[in-house]
Image (cartoon, rainbow, N blue to C red):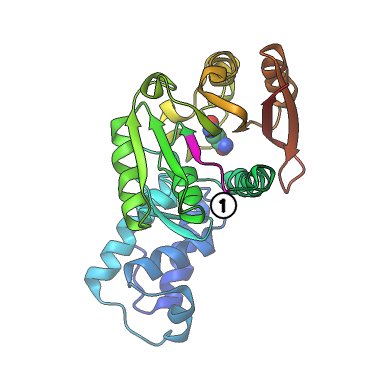
């Protein structure tokens, strides 16, 4: 920004920062200014307010100013702070990966819940033995699942080697063991079988991508765009998954809120039984498919 950032104390810096972000159209401007200043001062929001008499030194003010400018240009906060919380875990993120979304936490919860039931049905195991995460991106799903199921063998695939670099950092940070493979969808797992295939694939259509908020347009288009109708990946998963699914195996995919019927149809046509689950906002968000 801004020549007007002349304050030296946190509260005034926050007021000025929030005003600037709001002018740039950033939603939740004040909360974001808080998070940015707390990050710059290597503290927490709570402490920032508790220490409101401190004087913020000029180098830190400049860094704050620089972050505000970038956020004002609608760079996502998670890319600025290089972190996003997902399932209570802190994930490293950079612009080569989609930022993990709260909706996707629901997918992980569903996976964990289903896994328990699958384990119970098989009586001899608590968890599905082999899990495949397609289009893993930052590794959020694979890492969260592996974190909760230490004995599961989790394989995670992505076409982008830059994304896999990020995912590997997250697996290492969370101290989980994941078999990462680079390649297009099922290509790197030829001949293998999984009891659970999970995916949050790209699902935005060419038309919708133009209407995404500016922050989303700074995310990798590779992680978002799925052809003319947004269904390309579901089509490919439905058509090809059978040979990679063990007996009684399950597929769980995240979907866009308007895609429920069409995604179910794709799996039904490929011989699966399907169920649809909605998110906390009541929107269709997850499709489960299993062989009839
Ligand atoms: N939910 C994402 C969005 O907000 C899309 C994620 C995806 O394509 N997998 O645009």
Inspect the magenta stretch and tell me whether residue 84 lies in it. Answer: no
The magenta region covers 125-132
The picture places residue 241, in percent across and down from the top left corner, at 55, 20
**Of residues 276 and 55, the one drawn nearer to the viewer in this rendering:** 276
Q: Is residue 253 above or below residue 77?
A: above
Question: Which residue in the structure is indicated by mark 1?
Answer: 27
**Of residues 157 and 114, the one drawn nearer to the viewer in this rendering:** 114
Q: Quadrant of the N terminus?
A: bottom left
The picture places residue 53, in percent across and down from the top left corner, at 40, 88
Dominant secondary structure (helix, strand or loop) of the stretch shown in magenta: loop
Residue 167 appearing in the image: yes
Q: Quadrant of residue 38?
A: bottom left
Q: Residue at x 42, y 43 (%)?
A: 139
Label 1 environment density (alpha carbons within 10 Å; few <14, some 14–19, many ≥20) = few
Residue 241 left/right relative to 256: left
Q: Residue at x 33, y 67 (%)?
A: 40
The picture places residue 75, in percent across and down from the top left corner, at 40, 45
Which quarter holds ligand 1? top right
**Of residues 76 and 29, the one drawn nearer to the viewer in this rendering:** 76
Secondary structure of the residue carrying tag 1 is loop
């Amino acid at each position: 920004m801004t020549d007007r950032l002349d304050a030296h104390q946190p509260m005034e810096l926050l007021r000025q920062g929030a005003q600037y972000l709001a002018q740039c159209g950033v939603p939740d401007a004040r909360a974001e200014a808080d998070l940015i200043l707390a990050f710059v001062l290597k503290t927490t929001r709570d402490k920032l307010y508790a220490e409101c008499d401190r004087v913020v030194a000029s180098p830190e003010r400049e860094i704050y100013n620089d972050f505000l400018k970038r956020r004002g240009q609608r760079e996502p906060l998670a890319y600025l702070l290089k972190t996003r919380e997902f399932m209570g875990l802190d994930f490293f993120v950079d612009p080569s990966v989609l930022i993990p979304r709260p909706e996707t936490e629901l997918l992980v919860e569903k996976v964990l819940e289903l896994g328990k039931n699958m384990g119970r049905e098989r009586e001899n195991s608590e968890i599905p033995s082999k899990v495949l995460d397609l289009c893993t991106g930052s590794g959020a799903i694979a890492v969260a699942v592996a974190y909760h199921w230490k004995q599961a063998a989790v394989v995670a695939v992505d076409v982008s080697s830059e994304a896999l670099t990020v995912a590997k950092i997250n697996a290492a940070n969370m101290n989980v063991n994941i078999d990462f493979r680079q390649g297009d969808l099922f290509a790197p797992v030829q001949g293998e079988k999984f009891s659970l295939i999970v995916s949050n694939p790209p699902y935005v259509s060419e038309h919708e991508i133009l209407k995404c908020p500016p922050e989303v347009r700074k995310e990798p288009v590779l992680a978002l765009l799925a052809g003319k109708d947004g269904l390309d990946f579901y089509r490919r998963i439905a058509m090809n998954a059978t040979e990679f699914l063990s007996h009684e195996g399950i597929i769980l995919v995240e979907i866009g809120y308007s895609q429920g019927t069409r995604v179910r149809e794709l799996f039904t046509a490929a011989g699966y039984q399907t169920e649809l689950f909605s998110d906390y906002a009541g929107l269709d968000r997850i499709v489960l498919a299993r062989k009839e």
